Image: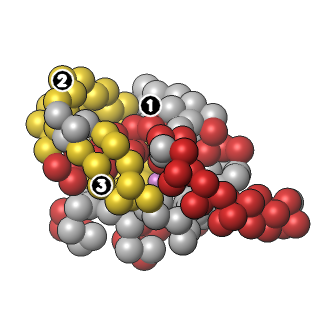
Amino acid sequence: MVSKSLDTNKLRLRQYPDPILRSPALPVEIFTPEVSAIAEKMTEIMLANNGIGLAGPQVGISRRIVVISLSGKREDVEVLINPVLSNFQGISEMEEGCLSLPGIRATVRRSAACTVKALDINGQEFVLDAVDLAAIVVQHETDHLNGRLFIDRLNSLSRLSCRRALKQMEQEFQEKN
Ligand code: NI
């Protein structure tokens, strides 16, 4: 249970440099209706913002819950709880963005394929082989669960090109908080 009185309507997208994005999320241990409600709200927020993946910490929930929709459509939404990745293969370099880092895009080097073991919203385990975009998205979202952002994985040149935008977001965050 996340909290006794969580109102999922109050969940909102967290943006860099919100510290919750840097804190490793805890596993889900009990599959309460609250977990379903969080996944549903995450789906809503992801689709409304044209995202293809979203992780718990990005809505202020430090739990290992991920929603993905590679097509950006509701019928393709997959919920992955406590995902564990293994069997990494190949190398892929793809331009990535992140709803928590609006306006920033950069090429990230990741594995081109991996195996995902996760629980569904009912707590049933499933395993899938992810390739191409699916593999990239599950790696990106699993990073979020570990407090990592794609900007941590950039080469020094890309990092430099993002610096100004990051500084601006840091300043705006400071002014708001
Ligand atoms: Ni992201």
Cβ of mark 2 under 8 A from ligand 1: no
Residue 177 vs residue 48: left or right?
Answer: right
> Badge 2 is on which residue?
87
- Identify the residue at image location x=44%, y=59%: 106
Instruction: Check disc 1: other Cα within 10 Å, few if <14, some if 14-19, many if 20+.
Output: some
> Label 1 amino acid?
Val
> Badge 3 is on which residue?
94
Q: Residue 83: percent from the left, percent from the top?
A: 32, 32
What color scheme is it?
secondary structure
Q: Residue 121: percent from the left, percent from the top?
A: 30, 43
- As helix, strand or loop, the secondary structure at mark 1 comes to loop
Q: Is residue 120 above or below residue 176?
A: above
The residue lying furthest to the front in this view is 157
Report whether residue 122 is seen: no
- As helix, strand or loop, the secondary structure at mark 2 comes to strand
Cβ of mark 3 under 8 A from ligand 1: no
Q: Are marks 1 and 3 in contact (CB under 8 Å)?
A: no
Give the Cα distance between marks 1 and 3.
30 Å
Q: Earlier in the sequence, mark 1 or mark 3?
A: 1
Q: Earlier in the sequence, mark 3 or mark 2?
A: 2
> Label 3 amino acid?
Met
Q: Residue 141: percent from the left, percent from the top?
A: 40, 45
Foreground tag (2 vs 1): 2
- Identify the residue at image location x=23%, y=45%: 92
Q: Quadrant of the N terminus?
A: top right
Give the Cα distance between marks 2 and 1.
23 Å
> Badge 1 is on which residue?
28
> Label 2 amino acid?
Asn
Q: Earlier in the sequence, mark 2 or mark 1?
A: 1
Residue 121 vs residue 101: left or right?
Answer: left
Give the Cα distance between marks 3 and 2.
20 Å
- Front residue of this view, candidates 167 and 98: 167
